[in-house]
Image: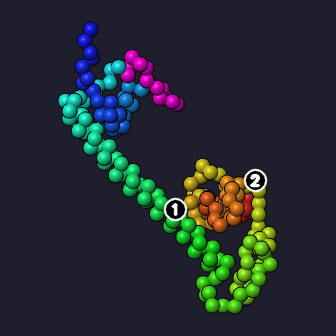
Amino acid sequence: MQGKIEILNNYFLKYWILGLSFYQHLQSLCTGSTALGIKASKLCLLKVVLPPLEEQKIIARFLDYKTKQIDNLIAKKQTLLEKLDEKRTAIISQAVTKGLDLTVPMKDSGVEWLGEIPEHWEVKRLRFLMVMYGGSTPNKNNPEFWNGEIPWVSAKDMKTERLISSIDKIREQALQKTSFGR
């Protein structure tokens, strides 16, 4: 028995599978409403574009090179985004705990983690500055209540050491049309 003749480069096939045309073709053969699936018998019906073997290898090497370049750019951008996020947090923290004028006289805040604050500022317990409710989340299915400017603090915001902002924000309508506005 003679050796099998290679007509398909595995790396070329990998990139072909990652391509949009394969995905669209695969979708057309899938069945199911909740989770899509495909039978092995249908998988065998998929058609593959097949350039000559040497051209497949050249295409695969080109895509290795280009995807590595793109992955490196993504990693650099991710690092930049993380640094910018840290800078944003630091600027917010500085402004809300020390003020904008760094030349004003400072005093001890009496709060260990906070340190000094501007002399003319006060420290008060949060409970004296806001109204807190539980169990009255505005309807998540009502888009007129969400993506506003009012912070909506919930348990998912409490996973950090310091609460700086809330993940969700509500609109004035949420306050007016729920138990809060009554």
The residue located at (59%, 58%) in the rendering is 146
Residue bearing mark 2: 135
Membership of 11 in magenta stretch: no
Question: Chief secondary structure of the magenta span?
Answer: loop
Residue 57 higher or lower than 4, as above or below: below
Which quadrant: the N terminus? top left
Membership of 38 in magenta stretch: yes
Residue 120 higher or lower than 49, as above or below: below
Label 2 crowding class (10 Å Cα cut-off): few <14, some 14-19, many 20+? few
Which quadrant: the C terminus? bottom right
Front position in the image: 111 or 131: 111
The residue located at (48%, 60%) in the rendering is 79
Residue bearing mark 1: 82
Is residue 170 something one can see in this rendering?
A: no
Instruction: Say which quarter of the image contains residue 3.
Output: top left
Q: Amino acid at mark 2?
A: Gly
> Magenta region: which residues?
31-43
